[in-house]
Amino acid sequence: MQSVTDLPFMRVIARRGGPDWFVTEFFRVHPASKPDRYILRSIRENTTGIPIFAQIIGSDADAMVKEAKILLRENVAGIDLNLGCPSPTVCGKSAGGGLLRHPEDIDRMIGMLRDAIPTRFTVKTRVGYSDESEFDTLLNIFRKHAIDGLTIHGRTVVDRYQTPVRPHCVAKAAATLACPVIANGNVVNARAGVNYHQRTGAHGLMIGRGAIRNPWIFDQLRAHYQKTTALQPRACDLLAYIEDLYAELARESKEFHEVHHIQRMKKTMLYIVQGLGEELEHAMRRMKTEEEFFALCRGALNHSQPLPDVPPEQSKLFCGFHTLLAP
Ligand SMILES: Cc1cc2nc3c(=O)[nH]c(=O)nc-3n(C[C@H](O)[C@H](O)[C@H](O)COP(=O)(O)O)c2cc1C
């Protein structure tokens, strides 16, 4: 996830179990681009032992091929094509989710990338730009080019991040594509993940925001399938996670600027504090110094009460997940 799931975040999450593989933030590609150096570090300095895919986003198929070939010289598990980003700037350039309006361009780009990538080539998509009726055409393109994996964020681009996901679309892909299909969107806890998996027959799950809020979610899911017991995190575990992330991010900065560092932490904290009380969220948005930051975190979390299992429904950052919690 752009500006959030960077190298320090990956290190911190890997210490708490972590996923089976990571995907980088997207490398923006245009004819004159070179791979972003900061994102490259999450590949070159990935010492977690967890394989990492390099994700690319762009609209110029030749440039995408060129960048994919450069990235293939790195220690990557494969190349992932982003067809899901709903940002108006990105879509306006017919990249990311914006490409879903142009299936013929996707067909050409995926064909060229498939020819250029001898190893794993995967795609991350939504179920359409404005309507799920577009999904069949997309599936035909993915099938035609024999991609190695498809992650589906079960919303349209127009849905952005707010609506419930559409498990029936993911199920259709899982039943009809030869490659593994990964279900994504709204997995806020292990129960939501297990339900999404069961309803779709997907081969796996991709988790974004839910893992920022609950970095133990991958181990909790593993424990469910292996019938073992996972950590049920308490407030002090969350505090240790926040302190770990703060230190990792500080270690990465060439020069430590308190104001910048606090701004960077805020991006992540806004996901973490969901469900811990509106007062804390408001205070977190306003705080400016390291002292204020730690006073807030320690004041709220230095105890051993269990954490809320799910964020509040209809919070700005987590919406529509109730459909995955229902039995
Ligand atoms: C701030 C932010 C940044 C994101 N950046 C990326 C990205 O770089 N690449 C990508 O494939 N998806 C990106 N996403 C989308 C997520 O990967 C994911 O598809 C979406 O949030 C739904 O899954 P979730 O409910 O598990 O978060 C981003 C989402 C957010 C909120």
Image (cartoon, grey):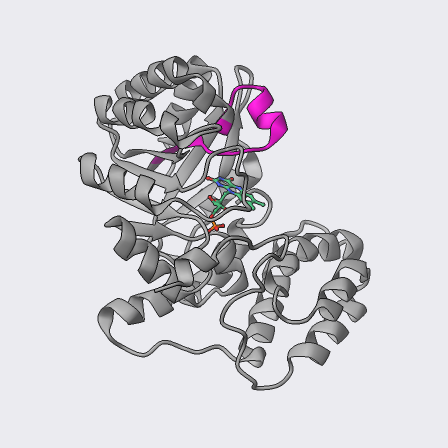
Q: Which sits in the foreground, 192 or 163?
A: 163
Q: Residue at x 24, y 75 (%)?
A: 227
Which residue range is magenta in the image?
A: 79-97
Query: How many labels, in total?
Result: 0
Q: Is 91 positioned to the left or the right of 141 in the image?
A: right
Please check the rendered image and state whether residue 277 is part of the magenta-colored stretch, yes or no: no
| Looking at the image, residue 286 lies above or below residue 106 | below
Q: Is 202 positioned to the left or the right of 267 in the image?
A: left
Q: Residue at x 31, y 22 (%)?
A: 137
Q: Is 305 positioned to the left or the right of 229 in the image?
A: right
Q: Residue at x 27, y 77 (%)?
A: 228
**Which percent across, then down, holds residue 135?**
35, 29
Image quarter in which the C terminus is found:
bottom left
Res 256 visible: no
- The residue sitting at the bottom extreme is 304
- The quadrant holding residue 105 is top left
Q: Which sits in the foreground, 18 or 150?
A: 150
**Which percent across, then down, holds residue 235?**
58, 79
**Which percent across, then down, holds residue 47?**
41, 55
Res 260 visible: yes
| Looking at the image, residue 311 lies above or below residue 7 | below
Q: Which sits in the foreground, 192 or 117?
A: 192
| Looking at the image, residue 144 lies above or below residue 122 | above
| Looking at the image, residue 6 lies above or below residue 234 | above
